[in-house]
Structure formats: structure tokens, C-alpha cells
Amino acid sequence: MSGAPLVHPVEMQSGTRKWKDAVTSVLALLNEVDAYGLQPGTVEGAPQDEYELEAAPVVSLLLKNGSVCSNEVDAIWVTWFREPLSEVIGSEEMSHFCARVNSLNIAA
């Protein structure tokens, strides 16, 4: 995998309502997973948008392909954290996360 971001050029219009809503939805799911125990959005935790840089490419893939799989999310995570998310949260939790992302019904 190259270091280039996984972005679908047509859908990467960050000013659109569809894009913002999709990122917010995926961000909420990543905050629930909270792989590193950062507690985004809490008084003692990280900012609410802590995982936004990871949420955006997940949304891009979802809008481009209609779904995401754990390998794709792992590739995004490796770009930012040098380790697959599935190794951090476990394969069962990763499958659950991908299923929840795919059920958001925000595909193009």
C-alpha cells in the first residue's frame, strides 16, 4: 500500500451534507470502538473528532464501493498507526465494526 490517501475524488467534497453526515456517522462508530482508550468527546478524553482522519477514508471507500471490509479498514489504520485495527481490537470486534459501517446505508 502506498502512503496516498484512500479517497474517491468525486465524493471527496467535504462541504457536502452527504459527506459530513457520513463522516459523522463513521466517526461515532470509531469513537465507540475507541481502539486506544482515548475516550473521545469526554471531559478527560480526546476531542470528539479524534478519529476523523481515519473516518474520512472509510467513508470514501463506502461511498465508492458500497461497503468496506476489515482489510480495507486495516490498511487505513496502518497508514496512521502502523498497525492494523483488527490486531488492536480483535477480529470479532472488527467484523462487528465493518458490519455497522456497512449498515449505515450511505453508499453512493
Image: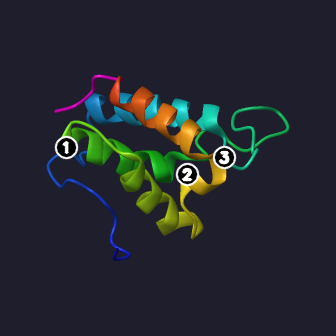
Q: If you read the primary sequence from the N terminus, does the residue marked by circle 2 or circle 1 appear first?
A: 1
Nearest the eye: 17 or 22: 22
State yes or no: discs 3 and 1 in contact (Cβ < 8 Å).
no
Q: Amino acid at mark 2?
A: Ser
Give the image quarter of residue 44. top right
| Mark 2–mark 1 distance (CA, rounded to whole Å) | 21 Å
Quarter of the image with the N terminus in it: bottom left
For discs 2 and 1, the disc positioned in front in the rendered view:
2
User: Which stretch appears magenta?
Assistant: 104-108
Which residue appears at 47% of the width and 68% of the height?
79
Nearest the eye: 67 or 63: 67
The percent position of residue 30, horizontal first and vertical second, equals: 55, 38
**Outermost residue to the front:** 92
Residue 14 appears in the rendering = no
Numbered circle sitting on residue 86? 2
Mark 2 crowdedness (10 Å alpha carbons): few <14, some 14-19, many ≥20 = some
Q: Is residue 86 magenta?
A: no
Secondary element type, mark 2: helix
Residue 27 appears in the rendering = yes
Which residue appears at 39% of the width and 55% of the height?
71
Numbered circle sitting on residue 65? 1
Q: Amino acid at mark 1?
A: Asn
Give the image quarter of residue 62. top left
Q: Amino acid at mark 3?
A: Ala
Numbered circle sitting on residue 35? 3
Q: If you read the primary sequence from the N terminus, does the residue marked by circle 3 or circle 1 appear first?
A: 3
